[in-house]
Image (cartoon, rainbow, N blue to C red):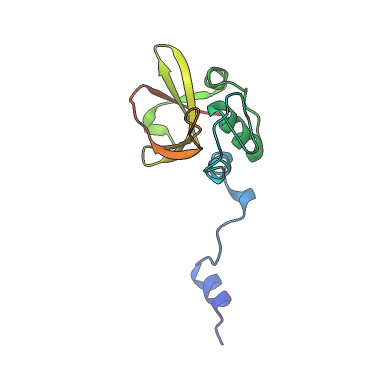
Amino acid sequence: MVTVVTLSVLTGAGLAPPPAQAATLQARALSVAASKQGDPYRYGAAGPDSFDCSGLTFFAYRQAGTRLPRTAQAQYDSAHHIPRSDRRPGDLVFFHSGRSVYHVAIYAGNDQVWHAPHPGADVRLERIWTDAVWYGRP
């Protein structure tokens, strides 16, 4: 008798997603950020229940297993800069004016980011609204 488990082993079909430890650092950070959907923005907050923009990225990557600097500009300065064509879900997206970074988010794919946008808003998934962005990977 062939069971579902036996069939999945024989065909290579999985019954469950791979364990979290098998995921990449970026995928783990992305998952943490997404889990904070609806948490309120609070200036200077880095979790676990409220965040500013760099507080969310700082918290997500810390939970994923690495440390980032605390501010958006410092995160940009410490990141490995990558071109738009190389971005992957979980990479950092830096919004800038001139040479100054004013906002950071986590790339979710499909031109969308998870971020803590501004006072009065909650952590949310949103379409990238400008071309004035740089990408980085911790």
Decide which of 106, 119 is in the foreground and name it.
119
Decide which of 120, 14 is in the foreground and name it.
120
Horizontally, is 59 left or right of 111 in the view?
right
- Image x and y of residue 97, in percent: 40, 15
Decide which of 122, 8 is in the foreground and name it.
122
From this viewpoint, which residue is outermost toward the front? 120
From this viewpoint, which residue is outermost toward the top? 99
User: Residue drawn 37% across and 42% down?
Assistant: 110
Q: Quadrant of residue 87?
A: top left
Total numbered labels placed on residues in the image: 0
User: Residue drawn 42% across and 18% down?
Assistant: 96
Decide which of 36, 80 is in the foreground and name it.
36
Q: Quadrant of residue 48?
A: top right
- Image x and y of residue 58, in percent: 61, 30
Q: With respect to residue 104, does 30 lie above or below?
A: below
User: Residue drawn 50% across and 28% down?
Assistant: 119
Quarter holding the N terminus is bottom right
Horizontally, is 39 left or right of 83 in the view?
right
User: Residue drawn 65% across and 34% down?
Assistant: 62
Horizontally, is 107 left or right of 74 in the view?
left
- Image x and y of residue 128, in percent: 37, 32
Quarter holding the C terminus is top right
- Image x and y of residue 8, in percent: 53, 72
